[in-house]
Amino acid sequence: MVILRDIVLSAFPEYPRRKDFNLGTNCVSSLFLYELGKIETSGIKKIIVQVCDYETKRIEMMDDVCRVSLTYDFDLHWKLSRVERKRLMLTKLVEGVLVVCDEFQIDKQHVIETFERLVITDLHYCRKWGKPIRSPDRKRYAQVKYIYDIDLVTISVFTWHKGEEQQALENKLVSTMPHEIKFVPLLGKLAWRDDKTICLHPKKRGLDDICVNV
């Protein structure tokens, strides 16, 4: 059984603002893949939806990676608000995934349902990381959350008293570029240093602890 592991929305190589565009797509593709869950494919582990400013609709296979090229309105993209830009990217991303589903006889019902559920939201991507941990004095809990947006990822620690999670206070720990290679190495172990200080110990060795008073 082969499961789809990654979905990418990427501008064609010659596009002048390719780097900016690609960074801005990460939050949308990551959110969609997370909400999509496990999808069985016919040997495809990654789908690259490559968008172009010229008319095209082409499918290419590279081992277990499938790339589908589609036309995209870049001028409209940069004129839209952040939320509408995310919706446009999501729409094109899913269009490409559905092309692949049709080509390789992959069940697309869950793809469609996930898209319909997400596209009517503001596509705000906030995820919890790890389990809540209790302070040394046993009075408060803390948990890491990160917000994945078009231009940056913000990692914060939220603290609350028992039974009051809805009133949790947010303390920012760090911000990074919007890419997993930048923020995932920071998502290590959260620990209280004392009753008023909490630290995030990065997963990657050599990186400094990130501490904040809460």
Image (cartoon, rainbow, N blue to C red):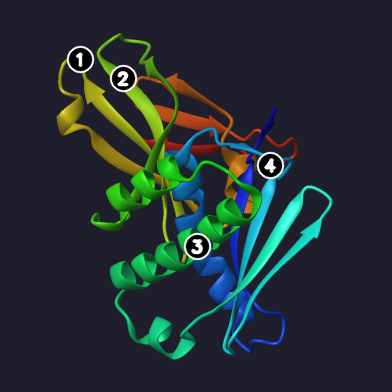
Q: CA distance from mark 2 to mark 4?
A: 25 Å
Q: Which mark is residue 207?
A: 4
Percent across and percent down for residue 117 are 28, 47
Percent across and percent down for residue 214 are 32, 33
Sequence-earlier tag: 2 or 4: 2
Percent across and percent down for residue 84 are 30, 71
- The amino acid sitting under disc 2 is Tyr
- The amino acid sitting under disc 3 is Leu
Sequence-earlier tag: 1 or 2: 2
Of badges 3 and 4, the one in the foreground is 3
Quadrant the N terminus occupies: top right
Of badges 4 and 1, the one in the foreground is 1
Q: CA distance from mark 3 to mark 1?
A: 41 Å
Query: Is 91 left or right of 189, judged from the image as shown?
Result: left
Instruction: Judge whether residue 130 can be spotted in this image.
Output: yes
Sequence-earlier tag: 4 or 1: 1
Disc 2: CA contacts within 10 A as few (<14), some (14-19) or many (>=20): many
- Residue at the spot of label 1: 162
- Give the quarter of the image for residue 69: bottom right
Sequence-earlier tag: 2 or 3: 3
Q: CA distance from mark 1 to mark 2?
A: 7 Å
In the picture shown, does residue 97 fall above or below 172? below
- The amino acid sitting under disc 1 is Lys
Q: CA distance from mark 4 to mark 1?
A: 32 Å
Of badges 3 and 1, the one in the foreground is 3
Q: CA distance from mark 2 to mark 3?
A: 38 Å
Disc 1: CA contacts within 10 A as few (<14), some (14-19) or many (>=20): few
Q: Are the residues flagged by discs 4 and 1 in contact, CB closer than 8 Å?
A: no
Residue at x-position 48% and y-position 45%: 108
Under tag 3, what secondary structure?
A: helix
- Residue at the spot of label 3: 93
